[in-house]
């Protein structure tokens, strides 16, 4: 039985994600931007929180962790590389670690770029990947600590997951990312169709930060950095994929 996932809007544009294993009752949250919205969902669903999974150290992803641990006694999982700037960890993780969670498990993927210690959690049986500020809807995180080469390598790892994997990212930046994607890839028919669907999804109040990987690969310009068509369009036929990604990221930074 797959895990039940609930996207929880927090702060101005963040998302936390609640995971529940119906078979065992175990319940986790991925990142804790704020405590109150998470408590509200737990109370509504009648779940007891058992685990907290942290993707990276930024305050808008960990700010509520100490209070939530105090309230629930949940076990905290996060990157060993970032242990010095995360709330106290019960389990320090590295790439390839397996996190057993109820009747399923997650695999830890190291995805530096946005930050050096950023990790993602992939639940293969449920087809879920929690990528926070590495791979985002129609975009990727700004490179605050890592290099373009590091981020491109991280995105390539995520692109290797099955296309039907639901990418659960850390923010609703859909509007700005969609405008940039249209700017750099205006002739992409898949993107045109997606932009129309985004308006429908937002009108129906669907979570804007949860998207199948296959759709991202077809429409996210950062995942299309290796496409010869896109390189040619921007006069960069001789660029490597990583160089093209760096060009696109620099363009987005000033867009």
Image: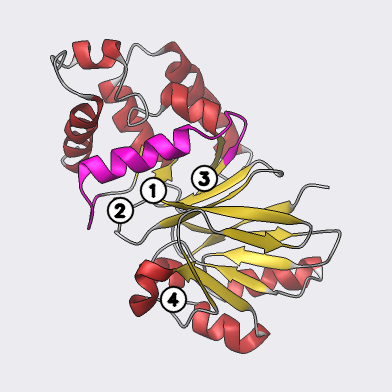
Question: Badges 3 and 1: C-beta atoms under 8 Å apart?
Answer: no
Mark 3 / mark 4, whichever is N-terminal? 4
Residue that badge 3 annotates: 209
Image quadrant where residue 249 sits: top left
Question: Badges 2 and 1: C-beta atoms under 8 Å apart?
Answer: yes
**Residue at (45%, 48%) from the top-left corner?**
172
**Cα–Cα span, label 4 and label 2:** 18 Å
Q: Residues within 10 Å of mark 3 (few under 14, many from 20)?
A: many
Q: Which one is nearer the viewer's eye here, 203 or 98? A: 98
**Cα–Cα span, label 3 and label 4:** 20 Å
Name the element at disc 3: loop
Mark 1 / mark 4, whichever is N-terminal? 4
**Residue at (76%, 75%) from the top-left corner?**
48
Q: Which one is nearer the viewer's eye here, 248 or 255? A: 248
**Residue at (70%, 74%) from the top-left corner?**
49
Question: Badges 3 and 2: C-beta atoms under 8 Å apart?
Answer: no
Is any atom of residue 246 visible in this view? yes
Mark 3 / mark 1, whichever is N-terminal? 1
Residue that badge 4 annotates: 63
**Quick check: 32 left or right of 106?**
left
């Amino acid at each position: 039985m797959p895990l039940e996932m609930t996207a929880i809007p927090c702060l101005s544009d963040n998302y936390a994600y609640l995971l529940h294993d119906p078979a065992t009752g175990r319940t986790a949250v991925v990142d804790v931007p704020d405590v109150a919205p998470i408590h509200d969902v737990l109370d509504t669903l009648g779940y007891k929180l058992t685990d907290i999974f942290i993707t990276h150290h930024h305050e808008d992803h960990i700010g509520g962790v100490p209070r939530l641990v105090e309230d629930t006694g949940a076990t905290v999982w996060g990157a060993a590389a970032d242990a010095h700037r995360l709330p106290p960890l019960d389990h320090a993780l590295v790439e390839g670690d397996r996190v057993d969670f109820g009747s399923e498990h997650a695999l830890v993927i190291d995805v530096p770029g946005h930050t050096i210690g950023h990790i993602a959690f992939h639940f293969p049986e449920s087809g879920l990947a929690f990528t926070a500020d590495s791979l985002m809807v129609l975009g990727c995180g700004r490179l605050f600590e890592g290099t373009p080469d590091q981020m491109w390598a991280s995105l390539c790892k995520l692109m290797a997951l099955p296309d039907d994997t639901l990418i659960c990212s850390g923010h609703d930046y859909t509007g700005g990312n969609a405008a940039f994607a249209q700017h750099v890839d205006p002739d992409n028919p898949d993107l045109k169709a997606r932009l129309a669907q985004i308006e429908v999804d937002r009108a129906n109040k669907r979570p804007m930060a949860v998207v199948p990987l296959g759709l991202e690969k077809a429409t996210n310009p950062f995942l299309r950095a290796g496409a010869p068509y896109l390189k040619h369009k921007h006069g960069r036929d001789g660029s490597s994929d990583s160089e093209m990604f760096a060009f696109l990221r620099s363009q987005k930074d000033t867009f």
